[in-house]
Amino acid sequence: MRDRPDIYLKRLKPKDKEYFERLSNNLYIRVYPTGSKKFYYLYRNSDNKQRKIAIGNYGEVTLADARQKVTELNALRENGIDDIKTHLDSEASLAKEEFSNTFEKIYNEFADKRWKINEKGIISIETASRNRREIKKWVLDKIGNKPISSIEKRDISTLLVKRAESSPEWAHRLHGLLNQIFRYALSLDYIDRNVVSDIEMNNIVKKPEVINFQAITTEPYFTNLCKAIYENNNITTKNILKFMLHIPLRSKNAVSLKWDYVDFDEKLLTIPRDEMKVNNANISDFILPLSDEVVKILKNQEKLCKDLGLFGDYVFPRFRTSSLEPIAANTINRELERMGFNEGPNYQRTHSFRKTYSTIIKNEKASKFSFEARELFLDHRVGNQVSLAYSGGATMLKELEEIASWWSSFILERVQK
């Protein structure tokens, strides 16, 4: 039949009952008693049953648009799709699901699974909180409501360039966090491609300079540090500062230290390997002898926690809350800042104690203790994979005990000056 022009539609009058008027092959318009009109696609499927699909209201959808839709639906039938309505409903459902899978939704799903403390303490509360703050501040306001499948590489690049304006180092970290999220989304088929992995950071953000941590390594600054820490009366930080002075763990391991890792009878500290920076299943747990002074510090901390009703999993809890969460490294750093260790050779923070130990022991006792033992005290490994597997064994334990005793005595001599 000849296609009806638009003027024909305008002249169609309502009747007591609604009716269909054919406009062209498969294209019909439905006229309601109210005078409103709606386009429909009518066809018969392979079972010779008539089917109809609503295209849209006349006025909102033009006649030309309706004809274009008919062409598209005919193409589906020509491609072997018999039940067009079911097909379209399925596509609409997928589109709706895809639209609902926003970046923020997938990010929250990922973070709830990965960025929280588990039984083994894989990620600290401090790290998880820092990661969440970073995403909230720099990402969610920009792309949080976008379907994650629609996010393009330039969306991410724009975020990273903006982040680099305040901190190139954190721009690189943010790239790593986003890559984790998009890898998770890819593994669960929320996306077909990880656009973050396509970004070459050094091409869009200047590589951050490697900054060597400052630390107190010379006199009279070291003596002043020892005296100040022992004279500090802040119950929140006094024992962990003493502990880190004697046992130079990485700050993450120090603040999240658990009582389960302390053996007072054997005077040993044992931290599971999967909590250490060198997380290698072929290497034994980190074992370190405790000097008499360190045992004294830990016993004092145990009594303090019990007296305050804060004795739980962690050796150094947050005393200002009742949640028994571990103390934050920033709390310790603020205390060191308050104590005046802020500039040049008199600068000290939680990350500084390891350098303080390694520099002083090298200068003071390089000939007495082996290089391997001095490094093992820091959980630094020397050698290939085979030697790594045995470097924490009994052969080294005696020398580590001697180092622990010497280092504590060296510190106490400065305190008593």
Image (spheres, rainbow, N blue to C red):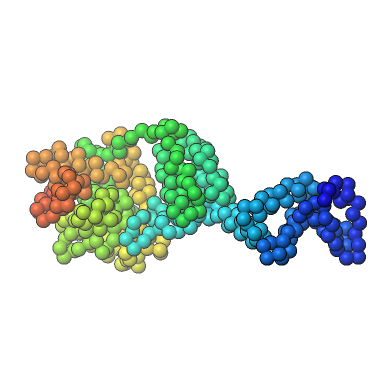
Left/right placement of residue 284 relative to residue 125 reads left
Left-right relation of 411 to 169? left
Residue lying at 91% horizontally and 56% vertically, measured from the top left: 13
Q: Quadrant of residue 151?
A: top right
Residue 412 in sight from this viewpoint: no
Q: Residue 228 versus residue 321: which sits nearer the camera?
A: 321
Say whether residue 3 is visible.
yes
Q: Residue at x 34, y 39 (%)?
A: 342
Residue 255 coordinates in the image, percent (x, y): 32, 54
From the top left corner, tell me how far across and down residue 318 is, in percent.
37, 58
Q: Of 212 and 154, which appears nearest the observer?
A: 154
Q: How many marks?
A: 0
- Where is residue 267, by image quadrant? bottom left
Residue 286 or residue 228, whichever sits in front: 286
Question: Closest to the observer: 72 or 248?
Answer: 72
Image position, residue 133 (x, y; %): 47, 49
Residue at x-position 33% and y-position 35% = 211
Residue 209 percent location from the top left of the image: 36, 33
Which quarter of the figure is the C terminus placed in?
Answer: top left
Q: Is residue 337 above or below residue 94?
A: above
Q: Is residue 288 above or below residue 354?
A: below
- At x 22% / y 38%, what residue is drawn? 217
Left or right side of 178 for 347: left
Q: Is residue 400 above or below residue 47?
A: above
